[in-house]
Amino acid sequence: MTVHPGCPFCEGPGGRVVFEGAKVRVIHAEEVGFPAFYRVIWREHAPEFSDLDAADRVLCMEAVTVVEQCLREQLKPTKINLAALGNMVPHLHWHVIARFEWDSHFPSPFWAAAQRAAPVDRVADVQALLPKLEAEMVRRLALLQD
Protein backbone atom coordinates (compact mmCIF):
# COMPACT_ATOMS: atom_id res chain seq x y z
CA MET A 1 0.00 0.00 0.00
CA THR A 2 1.27 3.44 -0.90
CA VAL A 3 1.29 5.82 2.08
CA HIS A 4 0.31 9.40 1.34
CA PRO A 5 1.47 11.97 3.93
CA GLY A 6 -1.42 13.86 5.50
CA CYS A 7 -3.98 11.14 4.77
CA PRO A 8 -5.59 9.98 8.02
CA PHE A 9 -6.27 6.43 6.73
CA CYS A 10 -2.69 6.07 5.46
CA GLU A 11 -1.12 7.46 8.62
CA GLY A 12 -3.36 5.55 11.02
CA PRO A 13 -6.02 2.87 11.05
CA GLY A 14 -8.98 5.21 11.58
CA GLY A 15 -10.20 3.40 14.69
CA ARG A 16 -9.68 0.15 16.55
CA VAL A 17 -8.63 -2.41 13.95
CA VAL A 18 -10.87 -5.47 13.79
CA PHE A 19 -9.56 -6.91 10.51
CA GLU A 20 -6.67 -6.03 8.22
CA GLY A 21 -6.63 -7.68 4.81
CA ALA A 22 -4.59 -6.97 1.71
CA LYS A 23 -7.26 -4.64 0.30
CA VAL A 24 -9.76 -4.00 3.07
CA ARG A 25 -9.49 -2.86 6.68
CA VAL A 26 -12.43 -3.04 9.10
CA ILE A 27 -12.35 -0.84 12.16
CA HIS A 28 -14.58 -0.22 15.13
CA ALA A 29 -15.21 3.52 15.28
CA GLU A 30 -15.27 5.09 18.72
CA GLU A 31 -18.46 7.12 18.24
CA VAL A 32 -20.22 8.15 21.43
CA GLY A 33 -23.72 6.73 21.62
CA PHE A 34 -23.10 4.20 18.83
CA PRO A 35 -21.49 1.11 20.36
CA ALA A 36 -21.66 -0.90 17.12
CA PHE A 37 -20.28 1.54 14.53
CA TYR A 38 -17.86 0.03 12.03
CA ARG A 39 -16.07 1.24 8.92
CA VAL A 40 -15.01 -0.90 5.98
CA ILE A 41 -12.06 1.00 4.51
CA TRP A 42 -10.49 0.35 1.11
CA ARG A 43 -6.75 0.39 1.85
CA GLU A 44 -5.58 2.08 -1.37
CA HIS A 45 -6.58 5.57 -2.37
CA ALA A 46 -9.82 5.23 -4.32
CA PRO A 47 -12.18 8.11 -3.66
CA GLU A 48 -15.18 6.64 -5.47
CA PHE A 49 -16.66 3.16 -5.71
CA SER A 50 -16.45 3.31 -9.51
CA ASP A 51 -12.66 3.73 -9.22
CA LEU A 52 -12.43 0.05 -8.28
CA ASP A 53 -12.38 -2.65 -10.93
CA ALA A 54 -15.25 -5.13 -11.03
CA ALA A 55 -13.55 -7.77 -8.86
CA ASP A 56 -12.56 -5.21 -6.24
CA ARG A 57 -16.09 -3.76 -6.16
CA VAL A 58 -17.38 -7.26 -5.40
CA LEU A 59 -14.77 -7.77 -2.67
CA CYS A 60 -15.56 -4.41 -1.11
CA MET A 61 -19.30 -5.00 -1.01
CA GLU A 62 -18.86 -8.56 0.24
CA ALA A 63 -16.85 -7.13 3.14
CA VAL A 64 -19.63 -4.62 3.86
CA THR A 65 -22.15 -7.46 3.70
CA VAL A 66 -20.17 -9.58 6.19
CA VAL A 67 -20.03 -6.71 8.68
CA GLU A 68 -23.77 -6.05 8.28
CA GLN A 69 -24.68 -9.73 8.63
CA CYS A 70 -22.60 -10.14 11.79
CA LEU A 71 -24.22 -7.07 13.35
CA ARG A 72 -27.71 -8.30 12.49
CA GLU A 73 -27.11 -11.85 13.69
CA GLN A 74 -25.35 -11.03 16.94
CA LEU A 75 -27.08 -7.79 18.02
CA LYS A 76 -30.56 -7.93 16.47
CA PRO A 77 -30.61 -4.13 15.88
CA THR A 78 -33.70 -2.21 14.87
CA LYS A 79 -31.95 -1.12 11.65
CA ILE A 80 -28.55 -1.10 9.96
CA ASN A 81 -27.35 2.16 8.46
CA LEU A 82 -24.97 1.94 5.50
CA ALA A 83 -23.32 5.07 4.18
CA ALA A 84 -20.39 6.06 2.01
CA LEU A 85 -19.96 9.69 3.02
CA GLY A 86 -16.21 10.29 2.81
CA ASN A 87 -15.94 13.80 1.39
CA MET A 88 -12.53 14.61 2.87
CA VAL A 89 -10.69 11.27 2.92
CA PRO A 90 -9.38 9.81 -0.37
CA HIS A 91 -10.17 6.25 0.68
CA LEU A 92 -13.47 4.70 -0.23
CA HIS A 93 -15.05 3.65 3.04
CA TRP A 94 -18.44 2.45 4.17
CA HIS A 95 -20.00 3.22 7.53
CA VAL A 96 -21.91 0.20 8.86
CA ILE A 97 -23.87 1.14 11.96
CA ALA A 98 -26.21 -0.94 14.08
CA ARG A 99 -29.08 1.28 15.16
CA PHE A 100 -31.46 0.68 18.03
CA GLU A 101 -34.74 2.37 18.94
CA TRP A 102 -33.09 3.40 22.22
CA ASP A 103 -29.98 4.99 20.70
CA SER A 104 -29.34 8.67 21.26
CA HIS A 105 -30.35 9.75 17.76
CA PHE A 106 -32.93 7.19 16.61
CA PRO A 107 -34.81 7.48 14.30
CA SER A 108 -32.72 10.39 12.98
CA PRO A 109 -29.38 9.86 11.18
CA PHE A 110 -26.28 9.35 13.29
CA TRP A 111 -24.95 12.79 12.32
CA ALA A 112 -28.11 14.60 13.49
CA ALA A 113 -28.52 16.15 16.92
CA ALA A 114 -29.01 13.74 19.78
CA GLN A 115 -32.62 13.38 20.91
CA ARG A 116 -31.85 11.73 24.25
CA ALA A 117 -29.01 10.14 26.17
CA ALA A 118 -28.36 6.52 25.23
CA PRO A 119 -29.12 4.23 28.19
CA VAL A 120 -25.78 3.27 29.73
CA ASP A 121 -26.92 -0.29 30.48
CA ARG A 122 -28.08 -0.88 26.89
CA VAL A 123 -24.79 0.46 25.48
CA ALA A 124 -22.87 -1.80 27.88
CA ASP A 125 -24.97 -4.80 26.82
CA VAL A 126 -24.05 -4.19 23.17
CA GLN A 127 -20.38 -3.62 24.01
CA ALA A 128 -20.28 -6.93 25.89
CA LEU A 129 -21.31 -8.75 22.69
CA LEU A 130 -18.66 -7.16 20.47
CA PRO A 131 -15.79 -9.61 21.11
CA LYS A 132 -17.84 -12.60 19.94
CA LEU A 133 -19.33 -10.59 17.06
CA GLU A 134 -15.89 -9.41 15.93
CA ALA A 135 -14.38 -12.90 16.12
CA GLU A 136 -17.07 -14.12 13.74
CA MET A 137 -16.57 -11.06 11.55
CA VAL A 138 -12.84 -11.77 11.29
CA ARG A 139 -13.48 -15.43 10.47
CA ARG A 140 -15.84 -14.52 7.62
CA LEU A 141 -13.71 -11.66 6.28
CA ALA A 142 -10.66 -13.95 6.16
CA LEU A 143 -12.63 -16.30 3.89
CA LEU A 144 -13.05 -13.47 1.37
CA GLN A 145 -9.28 -13.13 1.10
CA ASP A 146 -8.74 -16.72 -0.10
Image (tube, rainbow, N blue to C red):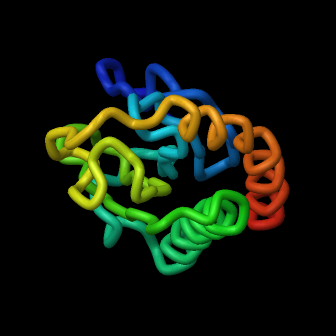
- So how many labels did they put on this image? 0
Residue 103 % position (x, y): 39, 47
| Residue 76, picture quadrant | bottom right
Q: Taking the image as drawn, is residue 63 in sight?
A: no
Q: Nearer the viewer, residue 140 or 4?
A: 140
The N terminus is located in which quarter? top right
Residue 86 % position (x, y): 26, 48
| Residue 10, picture quadrant | top left
Residue at image location 66% in from the left, 39% down from the top: 125
Q: Is residue 34 left or right of residue 89?
A: right
| Residue 139, picture quadrant | bottom right
Residue 8 % position (x, y): 36, 25
Q: Relative to 127, is 66 above or below?
A: below
Residue at image location 31% in from the left, 59% down from the top: 84
Q: Nearer the viewer, residue 142 or 124?
A: 124
Q: Taking the image as drawn, is residue 80 in sight?
A: yes
Q: Nearer the viewer, residue 27 or 57?
A: 27
The C terminus is located in which quarter? bottom right
Residue at image location 39% in from the left, 29% down from the top: 32
Residue 44 % position (x, y): 46, 46
Q: Relative to 146, is 106 above or below?
A: above
Residue at image location 27% in from the left, 61% down from the top: 107
Q: Nearer the viewer, residue 43 or 3?
A: 43
